[in-house]
Image (spheres, rainbow, N blue to C red):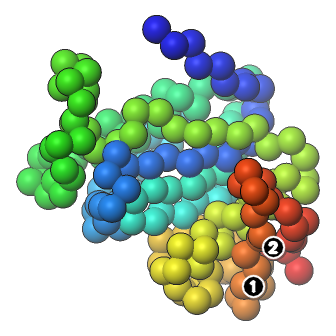
Amino acid sequence: MTNYRRVRIPGAKYFFTVSLADRSSDLLTREVARLREAYSVTQQERPFWCDAFVVLPDHLHAIWTLPPGDTDFSTRWGAIKSRFTRGVKASGALGWNPILRSGSKVVKGDAGIWQRRFWEHCIRDESDYRNHMAYCWGNPVKHGLVDRPSEWPYSSIHRDIRAGRVDPEWGGVPREGLFGELLDGVSPHH
């Protein structure tokens, strides 16, 4: 069995990418109310601060700050994914391709909605934090879903605009390097 190594620093900030198995699906935006419910219940059970969150049709990005002494983001993501899956299955709103269920997913009882794992990155410093915040906010623009970050309804940018943490006209989308690294020290805060 593969042993995945994850950086676990108590109380740290982490950037996440969580994707559907079917990258052509729109299930996350179509069933965003169920995703919000799964997220809310999990956050109540196992508190954390959500610095940024953006939901796209087939994947999402988030930045979380875990409580002091806490490193367990995996259980939280597992709970969110499981609750969402159960809610969607119970509603009959499944819009995934059952062909994507591998034999091992079938054996494990995996519904095949989500990619098995997620990607995480431990935020290193303030510049890294600003770049990942900008990445979250700018992701709907990067994918051609809207022209401006504030036009995308499923983003925490709206909370940050209301709180005065970001200019409503902010439109910065950081440039990516050959390996996906952020090249601009874009500051979303004016």
- Which mark, by number, is residue 170? 1
Q: Answer with left or right where residue 24 lies relative to residue 10.
A: left
Residue 69 rendering spot, x and y as whole percentages? 74, 23
Q: Quadrant of residue 149?
A: bottom right
Residue 25 to residue 186: above or below = above
Kindly identify the residue that appears in the image at 61 percent across and 45 percent down.
Answer: 16
Q: Residues within 10 Å of mark 1 (few under 14, many from 20)?
A: some
Q: Answer with left or right where residue 164 lies relative to residue 107.
A: right
Residue 175 rendering spot, x and y as whole percentages? 77, 69
Question: Depth check: 181 or 19 in front?
Answer: 181
Give yes or no for contact between labels 2 and 1 (Cβ–Cβ under 8 Å): yes
Q: Answer with left or right where residue 102 lies relative to residue 147.
A: left
Question: Depth check: 179 or 174 in front?
Answer: 179
Kindly identify the residue that appears in the image at 48 percent across and 80 percent down.
Answer: 145
Which residue in the protein does label 2 denote?
188
Residue 147 rendering spot, x and y as whole percentages? 58, 89
Q: Secondary structure at mark 1?
A: loop
Q: Residue furthest top?
A: 1
Residue 133 to residue 154: above or below = above
Circle 1: residue type: Trp
Circle 2: residue type: Pro
Q: Residue furthest left?
A: 92
Q: Answer with left or right where residue 95 lies relative to residue 23.
A: left
Question: Depth check: 130 or 146 in front?
Answer: 146
Disc with the residue nearer the chain's start (2 vs 1): 1
